[in-house]
Image (cartoon, rainbow, N blue to C red):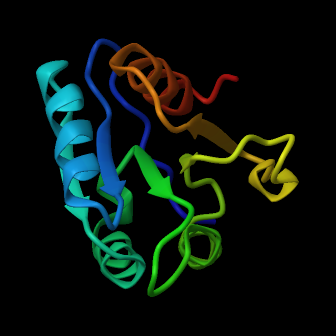
């Protein structure tokens, strides 16, 4: 069983942000870094898979856009779970769980677009703590 990185109490989670839209990636980076998080950015699904494969033990939370042109977020999550079944992922989508039940993936959180900085902070904190 793989090691799961658990944040030290009082520390900020290390977050991988995956979104094909640069403006969204940068906005999430600013929100999270303002709160003291260490943020790594990926602009496509394959880049996210490569980064996660190399650094999964160092990452606490993944914020993952569902709709991406190369490899969609569901496939990225499936590949990440091959390495770490306990990956703490937040699926980011413009769709709701009601309109797209496939967003209701066990062990994930959902961040519906458009979101506020407070919603981002709450989702990351909940995912890092493993609470819903």
Residue 131, position in %: x, y? 66, 23
The residue that appears at 29% across and 12% down in the rendered structure is 10
The residue that appears at 58% across and 46% down in the rendered structure is 94
Residue 108, position in %: x, y? 67, 45
Tell me: residue 54, above or below residue 119.
below
Tell me: residue 110, above or below residue 76.
above
Q: Residue 106 vs residue 94: left or right?
A: right
Residue 85, position in %: x, y? 66, 63
Q: Quadrant of residue 116?
A: top left
Residue 109, position in %: x, y? 64, 38
Q: How many labels does the image show?
A: 0
The residue that appears at 63% across and 39% down in the rendered structure is 110
Q: Residue 70 vs residue 96: left or right?
A: left
Q: Quadrant of the N terminus?
A: bottom right
Along the line of sight, the residue nearer the viewer: 12 or 41: 41
Tell me: residue 63, above or below residue 32.
below
Q: In which quarter of the image is the C terminus?
A: top right
């Amino acid at each position: 069983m793989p090691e799961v990185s658990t944040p030290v109490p009082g520390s900020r989670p290390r977050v991988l942000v995956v979104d094909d839209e640069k403006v969204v990636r940068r906005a999430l980076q600013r929100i999270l870094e303002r709160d003291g998080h260490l943020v790594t950015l990926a602009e496509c699904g394959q880049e996210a898979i490569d980064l996660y494969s190399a650094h999964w033990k160092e990452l606490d939370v993944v914020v993952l856009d569902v709709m991406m042109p190369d490899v969609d977020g569901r496939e990225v999550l499936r590949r990440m779970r091959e390495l770490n079944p306990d990956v703490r992922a937040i699926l980011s989508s413009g769709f709701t769980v009601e309109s797209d039940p496939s967003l209701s993936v066990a062990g994930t959180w959902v961040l519906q677009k458009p979101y506020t900085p407070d919603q981002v902070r709450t989702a990351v904190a909940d995912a890092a703590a493993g609470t819903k």
